[in-house]
Image: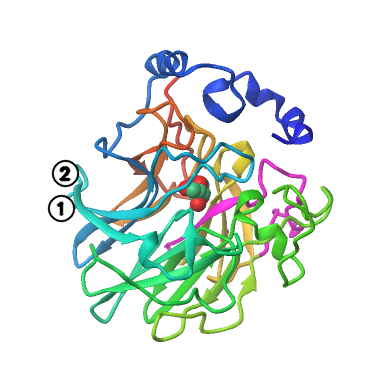
Amino acid sequence: MNLTKASSLSWLLSAPFLFAACSSNNSSEKQEEAAEIKFLSTPLISHMYTADPSAHVFDGKIYIYPSHDVQSEVEEDDSGAHFNMRDYHVFSMDKINSTPVDHGRALDVDDVPWAKRQLWAPDAAHKDGKYYLYFPAKDYDNIFRLGVAVSDSPTGPFIPQPEPMKGSFSIDPAVFQEGSDYYIYWGGIWGGQLQKWRTGEYLSTGDSPYDDEPADDEPAISPMVAKLSSNMLEFGESPRPILIQDKDGNPITAGDHERRFFEAAWVHKYNDTYYFSYSTGNTHKIAYATGDSPYGPFTYQGVILNPVQGWTNHHSIVEIEGKWYIFYHDTELSGQTYLRNIKMTELTHKADGSIETINPILE
Ligand code: FUB
């Protein structure tokens, strides 16, 4: 743990259930704490650990593309190496309250020639009868890249492309479709390495995930966007950084940990407005910003989801039969920050376009 970061986050240490990595609690104490917590929603899946749920409706059916969390031998560290996931399962639901069906292993890291480890948060898209799974993984140089795998079925199995997407880097791809245009958003700082690409080249100045961040009063590191190529396998244009600004048009700064982008980009459109939502990482919120174009700029608006149990917060937002839902995760089943379980709840857009803040833990 980086002590500078730890001391700046001292409030978190008084809430040990939020930051298992820093807690001295043993596992049974964690479970007792979890038992006392009243959660807004129940886990959707309990036979395995799942996280980072990207939900979509394809041909009238709900599909969820989550990470598959596992216990591994890798020691916990600041870069998240212990989030050492090796495969993906796809889940489907006939209706919003039906039990998700597990369609089995859809992609395994051993089948991806360029990928060594850490299959982190994926997303999927559908075009012309084919389904595309977008995923981050570390390559053999320990650099996160984005990969694509293709299937004739929304549930896979997916056949990976032999190489990562050209020019790709960092984590957490998310695809937003508007008509025949598909936009891919991505990026994550610290363990997600986005800050290491701030000059356009990978900066290998040190091993710490906190190296290479801008100074606190400089603009925060931007998430990225690019339109996908017509075959869905590559960027169809040069990737662009996304500006997240405050209501006066000033960029959110790197030191503004309550509002700056950390990871988990997602875009949805509601009433002609584009909503860019994301995790604030070490302040554990899902925040959102709105704009008039899928490229931004996006103006910070507020918090969609308050901190969940567990360090990470990651979500997707989807319209299902005229209602909006947020899919997210916490650690209710395990009490361990890297063994998560996915959940969902309804999300409300208010008459003025703002989103009602959700408390995943009941008072
Ligand atoms: O699941 C691994 C990583 O944790 C994801 O890529 C991040 O968004 C965070 O949820």
Q: Looking at the rendering, which quadrant does residue 39 occupy?
A: top left
Q: Is residue 111 above or below residue 325?
A: below
Q: Quadrant of the C terminus?
A: top left
Badge 1: few (under 14), some or many (20 or more) residues near its Cα, within 10 Å? some
Q: Is residue 354 visible?
A: no
Q: Residue at x 46, y 29 (%)?
A: 336
At horizontal 59% and vertical 22% (from top left) the residue drawn is: 23
Q: Secondary structure at mark 2?
A: loop
Cα–Cα gap, marks 2 and 1: 6 Å
Q: Amino acid at mark 1?
A: Asp
Return the residue at label 1. 94
Question: In which quadrant is the N terminus drawn?
Answer: top right
Question: Between 61 and 81, which is closer to the camera in this rendering?
Answer: 81
Q: Quadrant of residue 187?
A: bottom right
Label 1 secondary element? loop
* Amino acid type at mark 2: Ser
